[in-house]
Image (cartoon, rainbow, N blue to C red):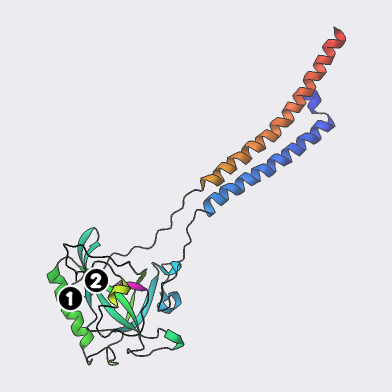
Amino acid sequence: MIRIARQPKWIALLLFALVLAAVFAWLGKWQVERAVIDSQTASAPTEVPKALTELAQPGGPIPIIAGGHLTSVSGAFDPDGFVVLTGRLNHDQAGYWLVGRLLVTNSGVNGNSVASPGPESVSLPVALGWAPTKQAFDTALASEKAKASAGATAGVSASAWKTIELSGRLMPTEAPIVPLPASDPFEVSTLSVASLVNEWPNYSGTAFGAYLISDNAPDGLTTIESAPPENSTNLNWLNIFYAIEWTVFAGFAVYFWYRLVRDAYEREEEEKLLLTG
């Protein structure tokens, strides 16, 4: 059989089978790579801070890549725009969120840059911090209201409000929920921008369809746990199946050459037996 395999036509056929097997193997490798690439979720460098105006525009939902992104923003808090969210978990412990209405400066709404808080400013809800008890929350709320009211006159158009810089993680707005019949109808547990604009006194203008989780909590509150988005990778099993098929084809190409050589050898042996018989 080795003698037959050394014949030029079978050597040429072997080379062809090896080339064919190499092509099939490359196709299998390509399918494995696609199985991983296709399963990866679209991700962005969320841990590299960007200005809020680079991630989102007011008046609508934020892009998918902006969700969970670290950002920075400047503005002033409306003294009458603080609300409480109940039943919020922080490190698996239920408590209260203090959420403030930030009038964003330099928001670029309608192509105009607003230098000081006023009616033209865009609203952004900011989750300032978490408290385990209502008493601790009320103390922090009174303190934040006092800070926001310092030097300001009543009403949302007060340009004398203190402008501050904030940084944190930008999150998409949550969906509003209907309170249960037995619950307090004025109790809020979700951070829905659509609901907040109906609760903020003297609200006008527009708002971002997102909220900011501040990375620095006020005195008396705990910083809200805010983990970066998870980008998981799961194999695409259809591509894996195709990769296995191409591997089988590669082995079959070499095996097919072997069977042809063996068949030629067996025919030659049968012809010898007939001649000698």
Classified by dominant secondary structure, the portion drawn in magenta counts as loop
> Where is residue 189 drawn, in percent x and y?
24, 66
Image check: 233 left or right of 255?
left
Q: Say if the magenta span includes residue 270.
A: no
Please tell me which residue lies in front, 12 or 69. Answer: 69
Residue 154: image location, x then y, percent = 22, 91
* x then y, percent, for residue 237: 51, 45
Residue at the image position 76 percent from the left and 34 percent from the top: 14
For marks 1 and 2, the one nearer the N-term is 2
Tags 1 and 2 touching, CB below 8 Å? yes
Magenta stretch: give its range. 204-232
Give the camera-side residue of 172 and 43: 172
Image vertical order of residue 147 relative to residue 221, above or below = below
Q: Look at the numbered disc 1 and give the secondary structure of its residue.
A: helix
Look at mark 2 in the image and give the residue it sits on.
Answer: 129
Relative to 227, residue 129 above or below: below
Amino acid at the residue labelled 1: Ala
Task: Tell which of 188 and 73 is nearer to you.
Answer: 188
Task: Residue under label 1, please give it.
Answer: 140
Picture coordinates of residue 131 (x, y %)? 19, 68
Task: Tell me where residue 171 sits by quadrant.
Answer: bottom left
Which part of the image, by quadrant, shows the C terminus?
top right
